[in-house]
Amino acid sequence: MSTDASTSTPGADAVGAVEAPGIEVPHTLDEPAPRPLGLLDQFGFWGNLGVSLLGFAGAAGLLVPVGSGPLSLPAAVTALVVGTVLGGLALGASLVLGARTGMPAMVLLRGLLGGKMSFLPTALNLAQCLGWAMFELVVIAGGLEAVTFGHLPRWGCVLIAGAVTTALTIRPLGAIRLLRRYVAVLVVLAMVVLLIGLLRRPAEAVHGSWSGFWLAADTAIALSISWVPLGADYSRHSRTERAAFLGGFVGYGVTQVLCMLMGILALAEVKQDPNKIFDLFQALPLGTAALAVLVLRETDQSFANVYSTAVSIQNLRPRWDRRWLTALIGAGTTAVALRFDMAQYQNFLYLIGGVFIPMSGALIGAWAARGAAGWDTSLSARPRPLMLLAWIAGFVMYQLVNPGSVTRWSDLWTWAGNHLHTLGHAWLSASVAAFVVSAVLAYLLSGLEPTRTAVAEVPATEQV
């Protein structure tokens, strides 16, 4: 990856030798993004995001992919590594675009779709971020209940999780530096403790085949690419493009592989019952302490979703203060998490995630065709309906291969997939197919669009 001169701080290398503790994200989009984050900051941030309490249970999609029989242990682990590498390449590329332009993710999409047309993915991203923020608060609360052995009531755990999450969003760059300096070390130690404990237990046999390999790889691909609509919100503050790419590709990829590998081992131990994973971890030597660290660390997931919700809103209202936005969003998601049943909404969140996989392909394909000179991130950027067509085509391909599980919606796409014979092919990955279709179409259709000179790095005051 090349390093653009504008993305570097003079005298600062990519590993963060120069500290800038007072630098923070501007309150609105009227000011350019500061770039204090070095390689270690990126590793710490993305490495922490690669570890998730949801990832342990999510490993079930590797062992028994939807639409396929169970996989053997070598097949599941190989699918995990291959899927993480493929998804990580897409994530890393999007982080480079954020570092190069200095624009948050939804503003970056103005160059893909146009100023006003970028409001469509922004609305979808708001629904995704808000939903996952609430879901993460519920997960953190469940973890707190487990490590306190029920001494803290559920509502109290939700309030604690919401308060910590909201506090982190007020000074987001400070939160990322905090993750790098302290939390990342504790997380590594906790992962080592749990992994050693799992490996020392008698191995449970995992029976299966390789027939659902690509369906399993889809799980890992989707997890990595799910961060593309948020990634540039953080990589825009990277000192170099190289640091942004390596932080996402290596930092996130390594910890996702370790997290889901532990999930595979744990699920094999508890007979595929995700509700028993916490109990298993607490039964390991030092397991309760290690689990407590991972529960507290989970707030970086809710932090990223709440903060990116605010930044996405700023694509619609660039002069709204992010501090007030995150405070209101944090309070609102906490209140909803106290009473909301996420069971059905989770399927809807997975559907939205499928929307952003082809969008990632369209983004990278269009950038490859047009480059920085043709990337207009101003609010007045002209509409690009051909890019919308490339995005939609990839989304249709994804649904034809993987209809999902949302009632009625999945029935429609299952019917279409059966007639078009796109279902039931173990060699076919919905994520890869959707990404490639959108990327290729966006690249080709970019040549049919009328040319117009644009500036990739426009001062924020001129963009609004």
Image (spheres, grey):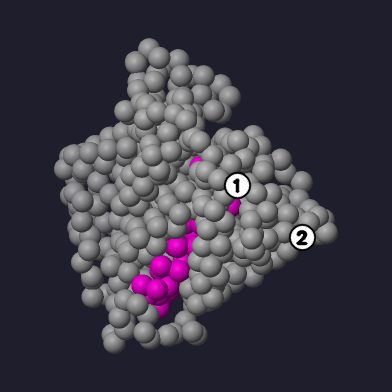
Q: Quadrant of residue 236?
A: bottom left
Q: Is residue 250 left or right of residue 354?
A: left
Mark number for residue 131? 1
Across and down, in percent, residue 77 comes to 40, 43
User: Considering depth in this image, is 284 or 354 the residue closer to the camera?
Assistant: 284
Mark number for residue 148? 2
Going by the numbered disc 1, the residue's amino acid type is Gly
Q: CA distance from mark 2 to mark 1?
A: 26 Å
Q: Residues within 10 Å of mark 2 (few under 14, many from 20)?
A: few
**Where 451 falls versus 99 (above or below)?**
above
* Residue at 45%, 25% in the rendered image: 68
Q: Secondary structure at mark 1?
A: helix
**Where 393 falls versus 201 (above or below)?**
above
Across and down, in percent, residue 152 comes to 81, 59
Q: Earlier in the sequence, mark 2 or mark 1?
A: 1
Q: Quadrant of residue 220?
A: top left
Across and down, in percent, residue 181 comes to 50, 77
Q: Secondary structure at mark 2?
A: loop
User: Considering depth in this image, is 294 or 73 the residue closer to the camera?
Assistant: 73
**Where 46 falls versus 365 (above or below)?**
below
Magenta residues (range):
30-59
User: Considering depth in this image, is 422 or 74 the residue closer to the camera?
Assistant: 74
